[in-house]
Amino acid sequence: MLEEEPAAAAGELTPLSGPSSLPHSAAFWCPRLAFLGGSGIMYQSPARSLCSALSTLCCASCTTTSSSSLLLLRSPVLVKRALSLPALLGSSSSASPRCGCCHQGASAGQCSAAVGPGVASSREACSMGNSTSRLYSTLAKTLNSSAAAQHREYLEQSDSEQLDPIDPKDLLQECQAVLQKRPPRLQRDFVDLRADSASSHHPIRVMQWNILAQALGEGKDNFVQCPVEALKWEERKCLILEEILAYQPDILCLQEVDHFFDTFQPLLSRLGYQCTFFPKPWSPCLDVEHNNGPDGCALFFLKGRFTLISSVNIRLTAMKLKTNQVAIAQTLRCTETGKLFCIAVTHLKARTGWERFRSAQGCDLLQNLKNITQGAEIPLIICGDFNAEPTEEVYKEFSNSSLNLNSAYKLLSADGQSEPPYTTWKIRPSGECRHTLDYIWYSQHALNVNSALGLLTEEQIGPNRLPSFNYPSDHLSLVCDFSFNQDPDRLL
């Protein structure tokens, strides 16, 4: 969350603002105009307003069916930065496991990997293992077969689907080798929330996480108690990947993603995920020198478990004006059960004083989702950083929606009606910020929450709060296991 977001980030809503009011050094990002650079890539333009061209191409009315292999206009594949082996992997030698990252009481030695096609039924987080990783050679093959060999400056579609799959255990081992000088991962346990007997079908694990845009973490967010070394991308991205690999989500919803095309899409696609990214048209990352392009929302799902039926990129409106906030909504068919459901990811406007604006954005998103789910006929899961406490109007709109939504993390409370005390905790020059802003909403008539990942305690987070050497973001990840209700009309 960018609580001290610059006014320029909302410039499209100010009638007097335009290219003349923007600094000449401002950056923009557009797939057909981005150029390859060396190790420090930056997208330059005399007018940052050109960035809005991308939102015209990726409009809310653009729907993609499963027959199409291209979900949106692809960005350039930045070959000289993408999957740079020293930057991503560090030492290729084996490292001791940094912690037991399992849940449900399993030890590190009992962990097994299950990310990608052919997901195992076991839900323990994968451990490092002892064998030497083959990831170095497979990633080197990525570079050798890339667009750089063909002297092209950008690609509209990457060829990652044609590359060899990556074993998640190997990727985890490489991440842990890079992180061996950092403190161990913080232990979190799943809480069983099942009210009746277990379903015969595998649960659907959904992970929600604002991962903190790299440009904002280093250039704008002013985490005064976080050492600069803790924010180094070469190690922080390994912490992010380690967290994802530890919990093995079937569906992953991320916000503040500004390294989609050079990190997450190339790696996660080779773990079996289908990947979609929708950037903010006026991303505040573009104001940061040496930025990596705009941040935005990203949605990933395992192709071995789901079939894509439709995909919609939504640029949210407020008071009839297009805003800087976006959402992705995809209708999927579960391969095991044959049932349809919709998964959506969003990131609403930050900062105190914008409560009515967030409320309008929430109303727009709900209306879009009502159309996509045909009222409430198709079950729905919404993940997001709403930048809103439970007392805000936008939270009440989702709670009282005709879509019959409930917030999954309320179920962790003693009465089942209270949100967690925090999902983000940081220290800025203005003081300590401890808020509940992140949520996983679901159709309570059609879906059951089998379990939810517990939050880090205050003691685990530590006095310097987040981010830190232990944890890569100022927001905590939320993870839930869902199953389909056998009688979905009972509570509708």
Image: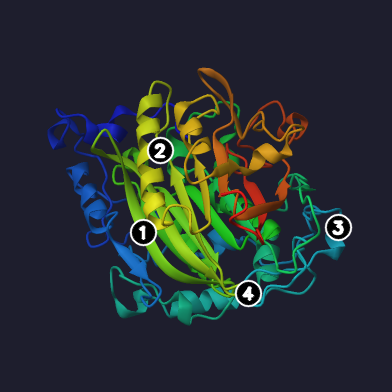
Query: SS for tag 4?
Result: loop
Query: SS for tag 2?
Result: helix
Query: With respect to residue 306, does 49 lie above or below?
Result: above
Q: Amino acid at mark 1?
A: Val
Query: SS for tag 3?
Result: loop
Q: Amino acid at mark 2?
A: Gly
The disc label shown at residue 362, or none: 2
Mark 2 touching mark 1, by CB under 8 A? no
Mark in the foreground, 1 or 4: 4
Q: Which residue is drawn at the image coordinates 60% and 44% (left, top)?
A: 472
Q: Which residue is drawn at the image coordinates 49% and 38% (left, top)?
A: 398
The disc label shown at residue 336, or none: 4
Between 365 and 313, the one nearer to me in the picture: 365
Query: SS for tag 1?
Result: strand
Q: Amino acid at mark 4?
A: Glu
The disc label shown at residue 106, or none: 3
Q: Furthest-front residue in view?
A: 490
Q: Amino acid at mark 3?
A: Ala
Mark in the foreground, 1 or 3: 1
Mark nearer the N terminus (4 vs 2): 4
| Circle 1 residue | 312
Mark nearer the N terminus (2 vs 1): 1
Mark nearer the N terminus (1 vs 3): 3
Q: Position of residue 490 (x, y in %)?
A: 62, 53
Q: Disc 3 to disc 2, how far (Cα)? A: 39 Å
Q: Disc 3 to disc 4, how far (Cα)? A: 26 Å
